Amino acid sequence: MPLKKINYKCCSFDGDIDRVIYFFIKNDTSTGRCNDNKRSNRRSIASGIDSGIDSGIASGIDNTIDNTIDNTIDSGIYRKSDNISIIDGSKIICLIFQCVIKILSNINLEKGNITNRINILEKKIDINIIYTAYVNSSFVYYMKKTINEINKNKNTVFEYININLLCTKTGIKYLDRLAQESSIGILFESNGHGSIYANINKLDKWSENLGIKNNIFFIGLKKYIFFFNQRTGDALLNFISIELSLALLNWTLKQWHNIYIRLPSLFINLPCPSHVLSTLIPHPTHEQYLIQPQLLQHNINKIVKEVDPYCGRCFIRPSGTEHMIRIYAEAKTTDQLNQILEKVKGIVLSYVSDQAKKNG
């Protein structure tokens, strides 16, 4: 349908309704259907998000429509649009996290009700924020800053909580695994696929030790968390939960969108033979860099340091589903981003060519 209303809140689900993202039109520089004249075989921002990849900006504007370059199709040309703002899974994490923190901050501890304070400090619950290497660095900075502010609160319930940022491998099964090991685990891929998990036994035991089991805000916290489906993939319920969260925080869509500004970022795909893909070994925990081949990783680091030593970031990884190498980069400016991508693309293509020659 044509999208014409400015700042009008929109929500999109995928075909089997297990993913949800929000978007809105920022201005009226463009009219008509947002996907008009888009080639069916060129990946759009939606399909970039489908891959679990944080689809950032490839120009000086805030978002792009086509921001994935696939070198199997006349690469080097990709179209941009500045009229649609995407609120993806990373910002859904922030929204849920802020709701959890707001509810917890209303819990007042009665010191006389706390049993064995030293023992409780050793058995804190954990709130784990789980993400992948494709998440924009602005999200990580925002979360670290927020957590640091929370940790300044002494003599509050937060003294008995560990809040952790955990980067894991790409793939919902890896995020799920970490979340289910948490007291409270919040996970959303950038494509809007995710949920919030909680271990009710850990939470109840913790609340008993703190003397807050019957506290209305602790009860409210459990009701809020368990309003979400404890199995990833229920986008309809996530949609209702997100609306609940926005109401709880009294946030507008624009306030939610503006909690942080993403760095310009982009990922590209390079075709690669399977025998060469197998030589690329990312870090087994988080995939943020290669452990083999070390020389290739060294050269990637060198390029990033030369182009943008402060905000630049780039990593490569073999696709788990295609004969492709994924290259993700971000930088302070679009020009720096493009420089990093072009230079890294060059050394990766050289590596692929050299390996192909060795294998005859």
Image (spheres, helix red, strand yellow):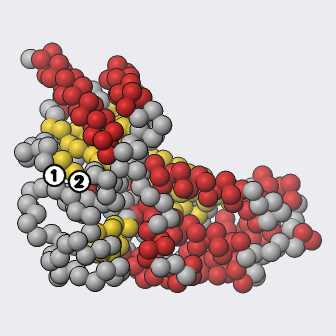
Residue nearest the viewer, comparing 209 with 64 = 64
Percent from the top left, x then y, of residue 241?
A: 47, 79
Instruction: Please name the residue shown 48% across and 37% down the image.
Output: 310
Secondary structure of the residue carrying numbered label 2: loop
Secondary structure of the residue carrying numbered label 1: loop
- The amino acid type found where label 1 is placed reads Tyr
Q: Is residue 243 depicted above or below 278 in this figure?
A: below
- The amino acid type found where label 2 is placed reads Asn
Q: Is residue 300 depicted above or below 57 in this figure?
A: above
Instruction: Please name the residue shown 8% across and 66% down the image.
Output: 37
Instruction: Please name the residue shown 41% across and 35% down the image.
Output: 308
In this view, the residue farthest toward the right is 112
The residue pinned by badge 1 equals 78
The answer to whether the residue labelled 2 contacts the one labelled 1, judged by CB atoms less than 8 Å apart, is yes
Q: Quadrant of the C terminus?
A: top left
Q: Which mark is residue 328?
A: none
Percent from the top left, x then y, of residue 92?
A: 45, 67
Q: Which mark is residue 67?
A: 2
Percent from the top left, x then y, of residue 28?
A: 25, 76
Q: Earlier in the sequence, mark 2 or mark 1?
A: 2
In this view, the residue farthest toward the front is 29
Decide if residue 230 is in sight here.
no
Percent from the top left, x then y, of residue 329?
A: 34, 42
Rendered image quadrant of residue 200: bottom right
Mark-to-mark CA distance, 2 and 1: 7 Å
